């Protein structure tokens, strides 16, 4: 029997004698022109053609930089054909990047399961478009039953004298908001009670029950919990970390620092997480616990582990078919493990970036993703436990901070003096794809290094080309015919999916496969199942020069775009059967250029942070070797052991930076989180190992990477410990920054977790937040000034000359031109004045430059971006 959904309400057109502004015609889409200095209201009338008694919640996905307030926030019908009016007011927020035609969706959610939405279009005067229009449809839940239960995160104002209440008191207070404590199934409604990461709770509720809570005293905002996605024998040495000198020695390799990893769990018996007798005891500040059934799995390295899955507490062990959490924990703080290798490749001594730091594991993710409610619970627990560093290799599509529970929770962590690293995301090279863009966290992009696990492809015409592969069986060195399913006149489809080989005989052949995002290993499984004997993975111009060393299940070579074109041209032009041989060349070092930006690393600018440059920094994130729960390759069911594997992503780059932050934290115990971030960013390298500007793998190195690709550049542990100067930020300034974004008091209070009135605390324009990078939007007919404050952490008496590498066509005047310090901790202010040099500047362009401060002993650098309005 086919289920038919009931109809949704429709927008009814009305004719009124007299004039109607075009935007007030009762049309199912909404388009306005907006003067940024004014507000504009739009009216719509909705007619009920659904059930007689029905309530609709109204939600808006706002255009970047635009506040859309809908009144009322819900509409209730009592009969069919009844009409209700809504009004949308649109005042301007603080904006750095604008879209000329931003699409949004206004979603009306009833108690059932049809979707009603209206597209909204805005066009701005004197504002240029950056990136693509944003559009998404909000799902609703409209069916004939009672409203469906969902997990909601409810934000509430902190009670007075919160510090005097115990955790049980707060939990009881949270339960008082609920209609009852248990569901009909016996499951508890309350999933998580929060008081540190955010002020509020997560609970199983219907939309009607949420509306009832909205009327209660102390309520701020409610939203459904979102699902987030999970986004090294050599890399410490590649970064310049040495066991005999430098940052490792100065920081005692992170001894005593606690790194909390929020991910998919850990493989506790792995050698990377064992105490070899040289680990220090747990710090007295540690207040966490070990939630493995076998408590002996925790030790002085792995000091705590807990898992969150709704109201249940499963095992913190990592999934055998994933290993993401195990891998990132090993990168951050894995112990030294001799003879580490991946199927015999890249053999050496593995370690994390902070090999003597302690690990606290918070499992909030599974192979299906990460619940936002569980992530907030993990951050809450980490704050109570006393971690120093938080590493989160996960992300979600960007949204305003007041609408992002993870950004809210991480601000609470930073205000509690916890340094937070998060992945920039793997949605590159698309513009404005960067995730986790709040200025209080370190947002990490992914770079390559100079090790290659070489695979050689010998074509039938005598040409030899090189790729990479993490699976290199010793016995394979055979020749086969090449087949490219779906290419030209060949049967099948591109991508080597399960159904790609229909009517195509691949048995005994080497199969060419276009990139299938995130499915590299699956492609090899499909080819092997169809009878292929080898696979060549072909980059397109998007992947460019990035090649990946996955543990394929059959002989494979992954080749870059130039090499792929050679292979395809050979296949296209040969008059006889095209053949190839895949041979393996083991591990090689010294590849050039290196480092480069991995094609997948998400790019800025960030759509909601007021123009602050994101990502902040690059860390190694391509073909990273680290701990793995099972034997990699075609035989994962091998004997238990401490296995390693290659993996790639900003997920791998993030724990590198978490480890470096731990090293700095151990040396500079009094530094703020902003000071640590400043040292990391201002000492970064914008040049590769050969002294050339870092290149972008996208389109195979035709462009130098800019600040929206790589932030400040490649992390440089050799210099990070002694920057000389830092840009410090008082955590209260983040609240003023939120006011400067144009958020209203309720929105700022939601992020702050306490009552805030912007008229009292004041506001800071985003470009004036004392950030280690500088980004502005500039009208060429005007000038704009930006302020920065530098704090001396170098020598007591030191003079810095200030220089600017100006963006093309932009004049930057710095005052003063030098600054002199007479004591450590002293602060000096500088002003940068930006103006056009008079040459033509195209609206929408982003221009790049550098601010440099040099004392002869210390040198720091801040990237500059100027968006032309």
Image: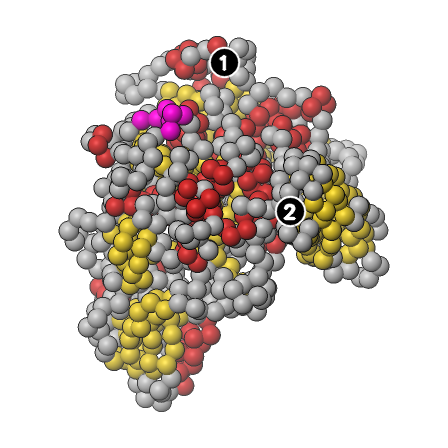
The location of residue 428, given as percent across then percent down, is: 51, 55
Residue plotted at (50% across, 13% down): 162
The tag earlier along the polypeptide, 1 or 2, is 1
Image-based side of 599 in relation to 519, left or right: right
At a point 43% along the width and 64% down the height, the residue shown is 450
Q: Residues within 10 Å of mark 2 (few under 14, many from 20)?
A: many
Taking depth in this image into account, of 59 and 684 the one nearest to the observer is 684
Provide the secondary structure element on which disc 2 rests: loop
The residue singled out by tag 2 in the image is 773
Q: Which residue appears at 35% of the width and 62% of the height?
A: 549
Helix or strand or loop: what does disc 1 sit on? helix
Magenta stretch?
283-289
Q: Position of residue 842 (x, y in %)?
A: 75, 59
Main secondary-structure element of the magenta-colored stretch: loop
Residue 165 magenta-highlighted: no
The reply to whether the magenta stretch includes residue 285 is: yes
Residue at (78, 52) in percent of width and height: 812
Q: Which residue carries the number 1 mark?
A: 163
Q: Is there any visible trace of residue 751 in the rendered image?
A: yes
Cα gap from disc 1 to disc 2, whole angstroms: 36 Å
Q: Splitting the image into 4 quarters, where does residue 288 fall?
A: top left
Residue 488 bears which disc, if any? none
For label 1, the crowd category at 10 Å Cα-Cα, with few meaning under 14, some 14 to 19 and many 20 or more, is few
């Amino acid at each position: 029997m086919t289920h038919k959904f009931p109809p949704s309400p429709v927008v009814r057109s009305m004719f009124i004698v007299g004039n109607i502004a075009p935007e007030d015609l009762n049309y199912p889409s909404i388009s306005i022109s907006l003067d940024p200095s004014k507000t504009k209201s739009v009216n719509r009338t909705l007619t009920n053609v659904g059930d007689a008694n029905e309530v609709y919640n109204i939600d808006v996905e706002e255009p970047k930089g635009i506040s859309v307030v809908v009144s009322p926030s819900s509409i209730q019908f009592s009969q069919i054909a009844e009409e209700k009016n809504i009004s949308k007011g649109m005042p301007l927020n603080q904006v750095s990047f604008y879209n000329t035609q931003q699409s949004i969706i206004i979603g009306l959610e009833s108690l059932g399961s049809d979707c009603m939405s209206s597209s909204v279009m805005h066009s701005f005067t004197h504002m240029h478009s950056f990136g693509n229009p944003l559009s998404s449809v909000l799902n609703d839940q409209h069916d004939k039953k009672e409203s469906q239960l969902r997990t909601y995160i409810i934000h509430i104002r902190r009670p007075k004298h919160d510090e005097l209440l115990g955790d049980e008191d707060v939990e009881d207070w949270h339960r008082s908001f609920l209609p009852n404590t248990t569901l009909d199934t016996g499951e508890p409604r309350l999933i998580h009670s929060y008081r540190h990461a955010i002020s509020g709770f997560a609970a199983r509720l219907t939309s009607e029950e949420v509306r009832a809570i909205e009327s209660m005293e102390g309520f701020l905002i409610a939203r459904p919990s979102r699902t987030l996605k999970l986004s090294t024998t050599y890399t410490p040495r590649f970064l310049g970390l040495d066991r005999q000198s430098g940052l490792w020695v100065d920081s005692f390799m992170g001894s005593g620092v606690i790194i909390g990893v929020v991910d998919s769990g850990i493989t506790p018996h792995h050698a990377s997480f064992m105490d070899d007798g040289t680990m220090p005891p747990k710090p007295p500040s540690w207040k966490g616990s070990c939630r493995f059934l076998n408590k002996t799995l925790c030790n002085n390295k792995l000091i705590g582990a807990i898992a969150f899955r709704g109201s249940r507490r499963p095992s913190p062990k990592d999934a055998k078919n994933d290993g993401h959490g195990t891998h990132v924990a090993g990168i951050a703080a894995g112990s030294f493990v001799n003879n580490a290798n991946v199927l015999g490749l890249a053999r050496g001594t593995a370690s994390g970036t902070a090999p003597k730091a302690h690990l606290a594991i918070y499992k909030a993710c599974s192979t299906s993703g990460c619940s936002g409610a569980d992530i907030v619970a993990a951050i809450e627990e980490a704050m109570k436990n006393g971690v120093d560093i938080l590493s989160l290799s996960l992300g979600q599509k960007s949204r305003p901070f007041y609408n992002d529970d993870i950004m809210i929770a991480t601000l609470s962590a930073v205000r509690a003096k916890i340094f937070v690293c998060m992945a920039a995301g793997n949605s590159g090279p698309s513009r404005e794809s960067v995730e986790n863009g709040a200025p209080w966290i370190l947002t990490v992009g992914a770079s390559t290094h100079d090790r290659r696990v070489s695979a050689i492809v010998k074509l039938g015409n005598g040409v030899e080309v090189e790729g990479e592969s993490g699976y290199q069986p010793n016995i394979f060195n055979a020749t086969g015919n090449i087949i490219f399913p779906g290419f030209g006149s060949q049967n099948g489809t591109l991508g080597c999916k399960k159904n790609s080989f229909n009517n195509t005989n691949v048995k005994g052949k080497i199969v060419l496969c276009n990139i299938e995002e995130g499915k590299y290993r699956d492609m090899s499984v499909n080819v092997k199942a169809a009878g292929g004997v080898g696979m060549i993975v072909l980059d397109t111009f998007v992947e460019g020069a990035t090649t990946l060393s996955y543990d394929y299940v059959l002989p494979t070579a992954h080749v870059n775009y130039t090499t792929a074109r050679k292979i395809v041209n050979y296949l296209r032009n040969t008059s006889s059967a095209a053949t190839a041989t895949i041979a393996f060349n083991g591990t090689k070092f010294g590849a050039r250029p290196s480092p480069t930006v991995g094609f997948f690393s998400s790019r800025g600018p960030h759509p909601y942070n007021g123009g602050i440059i994101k990502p902040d920094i690059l860390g190694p994130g391509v073909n990273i070797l680290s701990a793995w729960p099972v034997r990699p390759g075609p035989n994962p069911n091998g004997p238990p052991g401490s296995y390693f594997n290659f993996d790639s992503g900003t997920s791998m780059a993030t724990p590198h930076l978490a480890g470096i932050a731990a090293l700095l934290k151990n040396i500079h115990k009094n530094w703020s989180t902003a000071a640590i971030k400043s040292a990391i960013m201002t000492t970064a390298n914008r040049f590769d190992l050969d002294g050339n500007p870092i290149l972008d793998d996208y389109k195979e190195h035709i462009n130098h990477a800019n600040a929206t690709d790589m932030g400040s550049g490649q992390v440089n542990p050799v210099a990070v410990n002694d920057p000389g100067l830092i840009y410090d930020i008082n955590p209260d300034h983040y609240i003023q920054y939120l006011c400067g974004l144009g958020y209203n008091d309720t929105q700022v209070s939601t992020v702050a977790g306490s009552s805030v009135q912007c008229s009292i605390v004041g506001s800071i324009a985003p470009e004036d937040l004392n950030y280690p990078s500088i980004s502005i939007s500039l009208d060429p007919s005007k000038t704009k000034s930006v302020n920065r404050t530098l704090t001396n952490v170098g020598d007591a008496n030191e003079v810095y000359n200030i220089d600017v590498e100006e963006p093309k066509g932009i004049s930057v005047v710095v005052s003063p031109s030098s600054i002199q310090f007479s004591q450590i901790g002293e602060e000096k202010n500088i002003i940068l004045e930006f103006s056009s040099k008079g040459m033509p500047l195209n609206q929408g362009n982003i221009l790049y430059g550098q601010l440099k401060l040099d004392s002869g002993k210390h040198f720091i650098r801040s990237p500059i971006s100027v968006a032309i309005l």
